[in-house]
Amino acid sequence: MELPTGDDIRTVRKDKGLTQSELADQAGVSQPLIARIESDDVDPTIDTLYAVVSVLNDSTSELGQEEVTMSMPSVLKDARTRTGYTQGELAQVAGVS
């Protein structure tokens, strides 16, 4: 599964009748960050994206928390690939096996 796009987040936010400020307050982030996420001007951390999706998920929506959770391995792999770490090197740096 794929991470939700900025357009996905904007659509569900509007469908729920939330302003960017209301979504930001509930997710514990700033309104300018919500605006940047919706315009695909920033790649939010997985924690931030999870917080936003969790707020939007409080009612029936097209964005599921499972979607974010299941996408985590691909996000981690992409980040690892961009940094040039092997799996072993990343595990060693992160202090995990």
Image (cartoon, grey):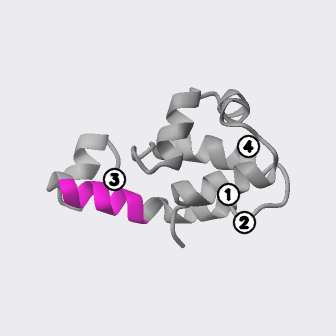
- Residue 11 has which mark? 1
In the displayed structure, does residue 91 sit left or right of residue 89? right
Image marks 4 and 1: residues in contact by CB distance under 8 Å: no
Q: Is residue 25 left or right of residue 32?
A: right
**Residue nearer the viewer, 8 or 56:** 8
Where disc 3 sits, the SS reads loop
Whichever of labels 4 and 3 marks the residue nearer the N terminus, that label is 4
Q: Amino acid at mark 2?
A: Glu
Closer mark to the observer between disc 4 and disc 3: 4
Instruction: Give the distance between the C-alpha atoms of the residues marked 2 and 3, in whole angstroms.
Output: 35 Å
Tell me which amino acid carries mark 1: Thr
Q: Which mark is residue 55?
A: 4
Q: Earlier in the sequence, mark 1 or mark 2?
A: 1
Mark 1 vs mark 3, CA separation in Å: 40 Å
User: From the image, which quarter does the N terminus lie in?
Assistant: bottom right
Please report the residue visible at 55 percent of the width from the left and 46 percent of the height from the top: 49
Q: Position of residue 84 (x, y in %)?
A: 14, 56
Report the magenta residues as a range: 74-82
The reply to whether the C-beta atoms of the residues labelled 1 and 2 are less than 8 Å apart is yes
- The residue beneath circle 3 is 97
Q: Residue at x 35, y 47 (%)?
A: 96
Q: Position of residue 65 (x, y in %)?
A: 67, 57
| Kind of residue sitting beneath label 3 | Ser
